[in-house]
Amino acid sequence: MDSHPPASSTGIDGWAEHALEELTALPDVRRVGIALVEGAGRRLLFTASDRCRDAPDTWCHVDAYAALPLNDALGTGTALTGALDELDPRYDSYVAAQDGTGHVAVAAVPFVPEGQPLGGFVLYYTRPQPFDARQSASLGRVADRLGSGLREAMRTPFAPRVAEHHAPHGSLVAEHEIPADPAAVGEARRFLRRTLSAWSVDEEATDHAVLCLSELATNAIVHTGGGCHVQVELHDGVLTTRVHDNGVSLAPDVPSADDTVQNHGHGLRIVDALVSSWGRDPDPHQVWFALDVS
């Protein structure tokens, strides 16, 4: 089968359109789902072959921590395959939802280009499958090819989006740019530690702030494909750090989803445990946290 056209010329929607077409053509496959990691890993952007391609809500958000084969495949970076009636009991609700669909087997396969999980696909089969070494290798090659295309789509040029924020009079303010390279997070940590030392912030608060910045900056770079802008502000004993996400949005606007702490990724759980308060602003994309340091 021919590989897809350059994803950079078609964007994420074009890439997904082609991926769904290719995957649906596989033998015995009736339905295909594609999920992309979004929102610092706390949720997935999902579309499927039976969703209307011209509808404004072609994509939807799903909880990345629900008991689903694809979620576990993304979490481990390893394909999960099997007959529906032989899946682990933790998928009982998922299996029950397949009643009456004609689906008898499933294959959940992650996209892991360059060792980095970006998403994956799930195939629903109408006939029993061997899932032997040959079939597994074939699915792996498809995932590698589609994952490379997804990576290229995410490298579309972007314009930095930095919120316009006016610090209160008398505030101490410092800023730092982080390029689209996970290795650059180390320099951001050193920047924040130097800054807080110069501002006489105590060691414990500094350690917490540096760890939280590291988590948020890493999430921004890994899950959006872009760099980010850091703004640190100290005013009246409160240290506020903002991480502005400069990455490309993976898809057009989608319906909003419940956004509670328990549905966030591990990075935001760490932030929630260490800071006085934190939040997210969707426009522009930014996550911030505040620490009392007085």
Image (cartoon, helix red, strand yellow):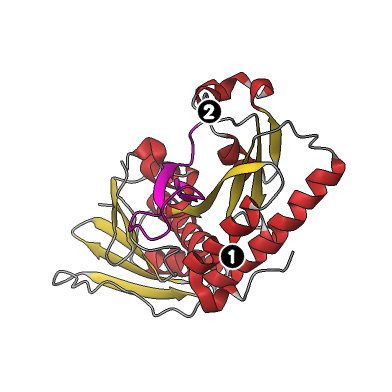
Q: Estimate the x, y position of residue 282 in percent, counting from the top left.
A: 29, 60
Gap in angstroms between the C-alphas marked 2 and 1: 28 Å
Q: Which segment is the magenta one? A: 42-66
- The furthest residue to the right: 133
| SS for callout 2 | loop
Q: Estimate the x, y position of residue 220 in percent, counting from the top left.
A: 46, 62
Mark identifier at residue 98: 2
Q: Is residue 293 magenta?
A: no
Q: Residue at x 38, y 61 (%)?
A: 54
Considering depth in this image, is 128 or 201 the residue closer to the camera? 128
Q: Estimate the x, y position of residue 8 in percent, counting from the top left.
A: 55, 77
Could you tell me what secondary structure mostly forms the magenta stretch? loop
Q: Is residue 259 above or below residue 160?
A: above
Which amino acid lies under the numbered mark 2 shown in the image of this protein? Answer: Gln
Mark identifier at residue 150: 1
Of the 4 image quadrants, the one containing the N terminus is bottom right
Mark identifier at residue 246: none
The answer to whether residue 266 is visible is yes
Q: Is residue 63 magenta?
A: yes
